[in-house]
Image (cartoon, rainbow, N blue to C red):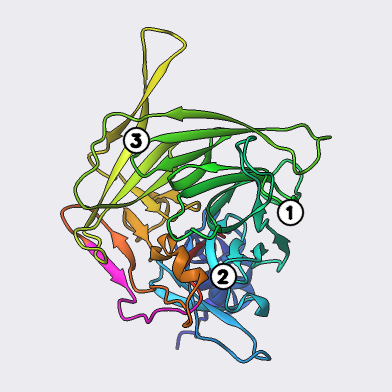
Amino acid sequence: MAARRSWADLPADLVAEIARRVPCLTDRVRAARACRTWLEGALKDPCPLKIPWLLLPADALPPDAIRRASFFCVLCNRAHRVAVPNDMGGARFFGAYPGGWLFLAYGQSCRHGLINLRTHESLYLPDNAVTFDESASNRNHPMLIRAATLSAPPAPLEGCVAAAIVTDLTPDYFFDPVHITLWRMGSRLGSTMFQFDAEDVIYHNGAFHFLSQHGDLLICRPEFQDEAPLERLQVRREYHPMVGVGFVLNAGACYLVECRGELLMVMRVQPHQDVTSQFKVYRMTQDQAQDADQAFYRWTELPALDGRMLFIGRGCSRSFEAAHFPGSQEGIYFFDDGNFYSAPIICVGDKPPQYGCCKNGVWSGPPDHVRYWFPEQRPSTYSSPVWFLH
């Protein structure tokens, strides 16, 4: 009779090869618990690229309960329950940054902060900003941050600059235009604030790029000296009207994402307010003018995704190659971010706000190949979903 063999008898190099074909980190950790051979093989060569997880808002828990959040992994098509800091319960998510950082507003429209779900380290963000126009009043303007991103990891703070799309909480903020603001991390005040109808923001090629609702770009380059006060930040601005793209009928939100060293704009097409039918992707190109000191920037539509996996979200979009993740598919992965336009709902009202959580999914190409995750998910009273960037 042949001797019984166990999983521990597999050669270590074979275990490592199997692990390389399991891109989900949680699945690798579970496999590592099988025995010492799998512990050494499954975690010996960790996957250098980690696909974002979708952080789904959970129902309220008792104050003394261990808070666990639900993170949906698109690679294994299931949700993982992970312990998170208790004090983030009831906070509104408005972005993420690689390394486990999450932007959130503990008070919905105030007490903005940044928390690391790996280390539980937390940082404060400004609740107020000053007007960019020097002729305006110098009083501080309370603001609600809609989306934000960073120029570098926030630890250490030195050299890290933040940029955000905000609503100025003046008495007329119901109709107040969108503003943008920048500041050095560690400052309690947004250093510059000016009006711009921004749809998204990304840090690309050493500068913050803000995308307008008409597809134009405002490029902001922070300039500061290390010995200058934290609150002092000079910003050099360049406005670039974009050509080559006519916004299609029923165009919804637009996003910026860096992919293969290039800047892309992703346009969501929504025939109805709550239905996404498809996406269009454009690449930024530069046309040299006759004057060598001038250049024209253009959006050129891509005919196909060509193996790209684009995870879109304001301030937190990321791109990956489907070829790096066995079993995955090219596509545009998106979440329900309707609260970007709902500043009045967040700030006022006798009832808790209702954040949509059911319009999350992936579009895999034309004509209308949209697949939704959790279509029956109930609205949340404190936040919409957000990407978690490992």
- Read off the magenta span: 370-381
| Dot 2 and dot 1 residues touching (CB under 8 Å) | no
Q: Is mark 3 on a helix, strand or loop?
A: strand
The answer to whether residue 136 is seen in the rendering is: yes
Along the viewing direction, whichever of 178 and 266 lies nearer the viewer: 178
Along the viewing direction, whichever of 363 and 223 lies nearer the viewer: 223
Give whichever of discs 2 and 1 has the lower sequence position: 2
Q: Is mark 1 on a helix, strand or loop?
A: loop
Which of discs 3 and 2 lies nearer the camera? The answer is 2
Residue at image coords 40%, 66% = 74
Say which residue label 1 marks.
188
Image quarter hosting the N terminus: bottom left
Along the viewing direction, whichever of 352 and 40 lies nearer the viewer: 352
Pointer 1: residues within 10 angstroms few (<14), some, or many (20+)?
some
Along the viewing direction, whichever of 201 and 187 lies nearer the viewer: 187
Q: Give the amino acid type for the residue marked by disc 3 in the picture.
A: Arg
Say which residue label 2 marks.
108
Residue at image coords 34%, 74% = 358
**Residue 371 inside the magenta-drawn segment:** yes
Q: Position of residue 191 (x, y in %)?
A: 68, 43
Q: Give the amino acid type for the residue marked by disc 1 in the picture.
A: Arg
